[in-house]
Image (tube, grey):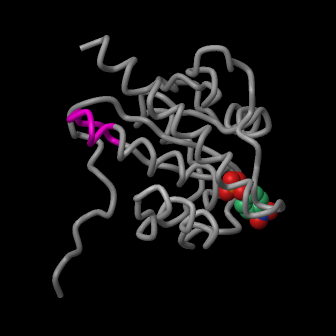
Amino acid sequence: MPVSPPRRDAVTADGPAILFLCLGNICRSPLAEGAARAAFDAAGFAATLDSAGTGDWHAGHPPDARAQAEARRRGIDIGDLRARQLVPEDFRRFDLILAADETNLRDARAIAPADATARLLLMLDLVPGRAGESVTDPYYGADHGFAATWDDVSAVASALVSEFASST
Ligand code: 4NP
């Protein structure tokens, strides 16, 4: 039987390794991953990009249909992403773990291994003037919440590309 290639980039790829984190890994963090993939591609920078949730309820599921629709409206297909739960190894595999909100940050810290090398920040800490803010969870809200989520995560993606452009 043919062996499928890994769905996500190998962590050995050049460029920063960044993990986007939320609760379910079906709304905010896959949108952030999709926005970052598009931004790094457009800038011509290599990066290893992934996303995860602190919870495991949606492991193996594609992004929420509303998140997929919002990404599509912005010209990006996130339908091939599949949710997974954050694991301690992520703190050694990634340079940066970006959490959507304070609860995600606290839950991530609770499983960080003693030899963690990843920096753990809020996503919006990277966006000028928005440090300490959360990306609001659109899961239980109206569909227009996903447009606001996209705006937030695309600001994060732009800030990441600017940061890595100025550090290379
Ligand atoms: P996310 O949104 O953390 O942005 O993926 C949520 C998805 C699912 C649930 C909560 C938030 N849930 O309770 O199932």
164, 68: nearer the viewer: 68
Number of numbered markers: 0
Answer with the quarter of the image where residue 58 lies.
Answer: bottom right
Give the magenta-colored segment's residue range.
40-48
Task: Give x and y (percent) for residue 5.
Answer: 22, 67
Farthest residue toward the top? 167
Identify the residue at image location x=22%, y=40%: 13
Identify the residue at image location x=40%, y=59%: 75
| Magenta segment includes 110 | no
146, 60: nearer the viewer: 146
Task: Give x and y (percent) for residue 163.
Answer: 39, 17
Relative to 116, residue 3 above or below: below
Report the side of 168 relative to 138 (left or right). Answer: left
Task: Give x and y (percent) for residue 44.
Answer: 20, 35
Q: Quadrant of ligand 1?
A: bottom right
Report the side of 127 relative to 44 (left or right). Answer: right
Identify the residue at image location x=51%, y=49%: 51
- The quadrant in which the C terminus is found is top left
Identify the residue at image location x=29%, y=18%: 165
- The quadrant in which the N terminus is found is bottom left
Task: Give x and y (percent) for residue 136.
Answer: 76, 43
| Magenta segment includes 43 | yes
